[in-house]
C-alpha cells in the first residue's frame, strides 16, 4: 500500500508542476529572442520573435505555413506568451516589464507580438492574434497586458515590414512536441498497483 501512496504523491507533484509551467527563455546578449517549451493546448512549442515580412517567415514551398490554423489556436498561443513567458517570476520580470528587451521591439512603452493563423484575399491580408506587453514606463501604477484577435490589417508582402515597426514583431512557432509520457507511464503504474492490491484483497 505504501507504494500506492508514493506513486500518487509523485503524480500529484507532476500535475502541479505541469499546471504552473513557465517556459524557458531564449536570451542572446540580453535580448529575449523567444522561448522554449511553451505549453499551448496540451503540447509544447518553441517560439522565436522575429522582424521582417510575413512572406519571408510563413510562405514556404508555394504555400502559407502556420502552426496554429484557427483564431482560437492563435489566441491560446498569445495567452501562453502572457502567462508563461512575460511573467513576474525571477529571471523573467526584466523582459515582462521592459518591452524593448524583446527582439524586434524598440518601443519603450510596450510591444505587440503577433501570431498569424491565416492569409486570405489572394495572399494580401493576415488574420492573427496579438499579445500586447505593456511596459512599466507606460503604466507605473501597474502594467496591464492583453490579448486581442486581429485581422484584415497586415499585408505580409508590402511596405508593412515589421522591421520598420518599433512596437510589432512576429511570433514564429515550431511544430508541436507532445507532452512527455511520464504522467502516462505513472498512470499505467498506478492501475497496475491498484490491480495487484485488489487481487491480494480477493485472495
Image (tube, grey):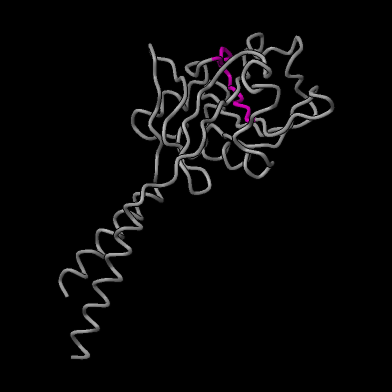
Q: Is residue 162 left or right of residue 17?
A: right
Would residue 201 be counted in the magenta stretch? no
- Residue 18 x %, y %: 38, 49
Q: Is residue 176 left or right of residue 187?
A: right
Q: Which residue is most to the front?
A: 61
The residue depicted at 75 percent of the width and 22 percent of the height is: 154
Q: Which residue is most to the bottom?
A: 203
8 shown above or below 198: above
Residue 21 found in image quarter: top left
The residue depicted at 45 percent of the width and 40 percent of the height is: 177
In the foreground, 138 or 102:
102
- Residue 194 x %, y %: 26, 76
In the foreground, 2 or 166:
2
Q: Which residues are magenta?
A: 104-115
Residue 148 found in image quarter: top right
- Residue 145 x %, y %: 57, 34
- Residue 8 x %, y %: 26, 65
Q: Is residue 105 left or right of residue 148?
A: left
Q: Which residue is most to the left?
A: 2
Count of numbered labels shown in the rendering: 0
The residue depicted at 34 percent of the width and 49 percent of the height is: 17
Would residue 105 be counted in the magenta stretch? yes
The residue depicted at 60 percent of the width and 20 percent of the height is: 169
Residue 190 found in image quarter: bottom left
User: Can you say which quadrant of the picture contains the C terminus?
Assistant: bottom left
12 shown above or below 62: below
Amino acid at each position: 500500500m505504501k507504494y500506492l501512496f508514493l506513486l500518487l504523491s509523485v503524480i500529484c507533484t507532476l500535475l502541479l508542476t505541469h499546471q504552473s509551467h513557465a517556459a524557458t527563455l531564449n536570451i542572446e546578449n540580453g535580448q529575449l529572442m523567444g522561448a522554449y517549451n511553451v505549453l499551448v493546448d496540451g503540447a509544447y512549442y518553441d517560439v522565436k520573435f522575429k522582424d521582417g515580412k510575413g512572406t519571408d517567415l510563413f510562405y514556404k514551398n508555394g504555400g502559407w505555413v502556420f502552426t496554429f490554423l484557427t483564431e482560437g489556436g492563435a489566441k491560446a498561443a498569445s495567452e501562453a506568451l502572457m502567462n508563461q513567458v512575460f511573467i513576474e517570476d525571477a529571471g523573467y520580470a526584466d523582459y515582462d516589464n521592459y518591452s524593448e528587451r524583446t527582439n524586434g521591439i524598440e518601443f519603450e512603452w510596450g510591444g505587440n507580438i503577433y501570431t498569424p493563423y491565416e492569409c486570405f484575399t489572394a495572399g494580401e491580408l493576415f488574420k492573427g492574434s496579438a499579445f500586447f506587453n505593456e511596459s512599466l514606463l507606460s503604466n507605473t501604477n501597474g502594467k496591464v497586458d492583453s490579448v486581442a484577435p486581429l485581422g484584415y490589417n497586415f499585408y505580409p508582402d508590402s511596405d508593412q515590414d515589421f522591421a520598420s515597426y518599433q512596437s510589432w514583431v512576429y511570433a514564429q512557432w515550431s511544430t508541436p512536441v507532445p507532452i512527455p509520457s511520464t504522467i502516462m507511464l505513472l498512470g499505467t503504474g498506478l492501475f497496475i498497483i491498484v490491480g495487484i492490491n485488489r487481487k491480494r484483497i480477493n485472495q
